[in-house]
Image (tube, helix red, strand yellow):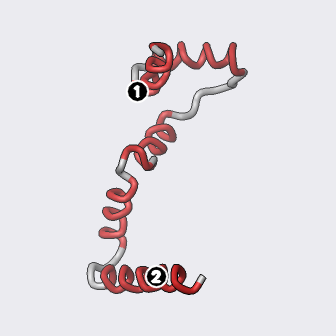
Amino acid sequence: MMWTFVRSVVPYLSRDFRSALLEYQKEIEGKRAAQTRWLSCLEDINSYSHGLTFALGYMWVSKAFDSDVIPLVSEKLCIHFLMRLIFY
């Protein structure tokens, strides 16, 4: 049980801990290389378990689109999904 906890927090620890885990995974699992740090951080942020997916999506939509268009698109998407639920 303790080892399961340790393995779950190692990705968030310093490079020494991550290197030790990689060496273990090379021997036991045949893993060749560690995932790049930026990619693992991005996956953590985007995973549903961390709850940031929708918040980051909202921030991006708010910056990328005109604020007058967002309610219109939201309404159209809601209608589209409701129609799919009703007729399919």
Q: Earlier in the sequence, mark 2 or mark 1?
A: 1
The vertical placement of 82 against 21, above or below, is below
Q: CA distance from mark 2 to mark 1?
A: 41 Å
- Where residue 18 appears, x then y in whole percent? 49, 20
Residue at (58% x, 19% y) in the render: 22
Seen in the image, is 88 located left or right of residue 62? right
Q: Secondary structure at mark 1?
A: helix
Place of residue 41 in the rendered image (x, y in percent of width and height, measured from the top left): 44, 39
Q: Amino acid at mark 2?
A: Leu
Residue nearest the viewer, comparing 24 with 3:
3
Return the residue nearer the eye: 54 or 83.
Answer: 83
Secondary element at tag 2: helix
Residue 63 lies, with reference to residue 71, above or below; the image says: above
Determine which of the numbered discs, if any, sits on residue 82 in the image. Answer: 2
Residue in view at x 34 percent, y 86 percent: 72
Q: Are marks 2 and 1 in contact (CB under 8 Å)?
A: no
Residue type of the residue flagged with mark 1: Tyr
Q: Residue 75's image quarter?
A: bottom left
Left or right: 50 as drawn, with respect to 34: left
- The residue singled out by tag 1 in the image is 12
Q: Viewed as shown, does residue 45 lie left or right of 7?
A: left
Q: Nearer the viewer, mark 2 or mark 1?
A: 2
Q: Residue at x 45, y 13 (%)?
A: 2
Spot the residue most to the right. 30
In this rendering, is residue 9 above or below 82?
above
